[in-house]
Image (cartoon, helix red, strand yellow):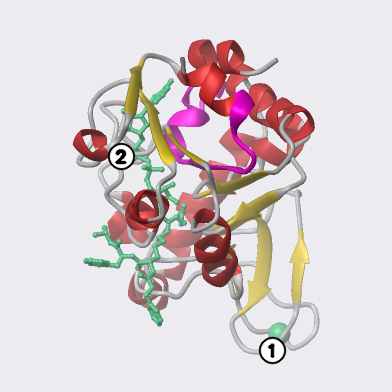
Amino acid sequence: MVKAVLDGGRSVVALTGAGVSAESGVPTFRGKDGMWKKNRPEDLARPDAFAAHPELVWEFYNWRREKMGQCEPNPAHVALARMEKTLPNFLLITQNVDGLHARAGSRKLMEMHGSLWQVKCTVCTHAREDYSALPALPECPVCGHLLRPGVVWFGEPLVPGVLKVAIDQISKADVFLSIGTSNLVQPAASFYQLAKDHGAVTVEVNLEPTPNTGFMDFALHGQAGDILPELVT
Ligand code: BV8
Ligand code: ZN
């Protein structure tokens, strides 16, 4: 049924969260496998935490970069990259910062929370993509000040331009897919409402119910890596 809805959809928007990378071995934020040591990501992915303890926050991100380096896209990422090719109008919006959608071939992609592979200066405009093993406190090659990860922290606005495009595209979508997200982080967790408000068919793919499940037209429970390949031609 959902596959028929997708194939008939003139425009499809998919929103993904950490669950779509779980089968690649990437720890989720809030899952039982927990993200990192005793600290909660919400306590580290914040500007005030970085200002107070830059070495601890960089240890968190360097650990994730190193771990990510060992991970490969899984069938869920591949299926989403294929949807972009087989559906007439498809946009993928991800909350993930791991870069796995791009590695799987997705190009019509918005990384709304930035990327682990981006670093930027805390003072000047220097910013770059960097896949290397960074030092404990990486410094800007231009002005010498501290670099920070190129991700959006809690309390920070989304990557410029993303929200406008997301609102515009979701408000026009026939089908909205919410995949592997606990729907606890805003504004992503409210995107489904934009789709519903204009009559789109809404589909959730998750291991378990989320706060949005009751509002979705379809809730497919299982591994994204099993479900998504069944939905794509
Ligand atoms: C902003 C980058 C405004 C960093 C991340 C109250 C109301 C509204 C908003 C707020 C509020 N209180 C606070 C806020 C703001 C805050 C927020 O939402 N806080 C939450 C905690 C309440 N939001 C923000 O600050 C955002 N900015 O609002 O800006 C503004 C405007 C102008 C000026 C100033 C400010 C920015 C939020 C971005 C934070 N950065 N990441 C980093 O990664 O280090 S968020 C982080 O959580 C990740 O990006 C992650 O993707 C995201 C969401 O988590 P999920 O992806 O859902 O992952 P999770 O582990 O939670 O769940 C995994 C799911 O997968 C589970 O459901 C599981 O069942 C499922 N699953 C697991 N395995 C599988 C699976 N499903 C299928 N198959 C599987 N195999
Ligand atoms: Zn600089």
Q: Is residue 154 above or below residue 132?
A: below
Q: Residue at x 54, y 18 (%)?
A: 3
* Ligand 2: quadrant of the figure: bottom right
Say if residue 72 shows up in the picture.
Answer: no
Which of 56/180 is in front?
180
The kind of residue on which mark 2 rests is Ser
Quarter of the image for residue 219 reads top left
Q: Is residue 208 above or below residue 127?
A: above
Q: What label does residue 220 carry, if any?
A: none
State the residue position of label 2: 182
**Spatial CA span between label 2 and label 1:** 35 Å
Image mark count:
2
Q: Is residue 105 above or below residue 230?
A: below
State the residue position of label 1: 124
Establish whether ligand 1 lies closer than 8 Å to the Cβ of label 2.
Answer: yes
Q: Position of residue 92 (x, y in %)?
A: 61, 44
